[in-house]
Image (tube, rainbow, N blue to C red):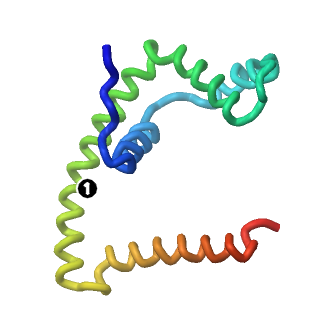
Amino acid sequence: MESTPPPEPPELAMRIACDTAARVDVDLAALVPGVRRSLRRSAGRRDWIETESLALDALAELWDAELADSCRLALADVHDLSLVQTAKIAEAVEALEREGRDAWIAGAVLHDLAARLAWNVCDDEGLLVR
């Protein structure tokens, strides 16, 4: 069976995936010892890529047992969330049209952009690393 490509733009696919993954019910702490043992036995690179590969293997073993159902439930929650967000987005559009820069959405966007800009400046100035 051919795989369905993720939706475009990639940011949308990432948002759906992150919102779903955040709601999947799995005890990652219980998997740490097994992945750690596998990493210690590995003749591989012992870096992030190797560790993530071993983690994927551990999770794959749980897919049929519990993760597939948990993923379905999480997607249902994300779907419900998107319906609520759709209504709230419409309200935000109305607030922006009515209130301009004084609207809550304008303030939130400006604060987010200011934080990213400040991060970039601090990074350029070498202030993020001691």
Q: Residue at x 54, y 75 (%)?
A: 117
Q: Residues within 10 Å of mark 1 (few under 14, many from 20)?
A: few
Q: Measuring from the top left, give residue 44's x and y in whole percent.
A: 77, 23
Q: Measuring from the top left, give residue 43's x and y in whole percent.
A: 81, 19
Q: Residue at x 46, y 18 (%)?
A: 63
Rendering quarter of residue 107: bottom left
Image quarter hosting the C terminus: bottom right
Residue closer to the observer: 67 or 57: 57
Residue 114 lies, with reference to residue 44, above or below; the image says below
Q: Quick check: 60 left or right of 39?
A: left
Residue closer to the observer: 92 or 45: 45
Residue 98 lies, with reference to residue 45, above or below; the image says below
Please name the amino acid that badge 1 sits on: Gln
Q: Measuring from the top left, give residue 41's x and y in whole percent.
A: 80, 17
Q: Quick check: 41 left or right of 105?
A: right
* Circle 1: element type: helix
Q: Quick check: 46 left or right of 124?
A: right
> On the image, numbered disc 1 is attached to which residue?
85
Residue 12 lies, with reference to residue 63, above or below; the image says below
Q: Residue at x 47, y 73 (%)?
A: 113
Q: Quick check: 123 left or right of 57?
A: right
Q: Residue at x 31, y 13 (%)?
A: 1
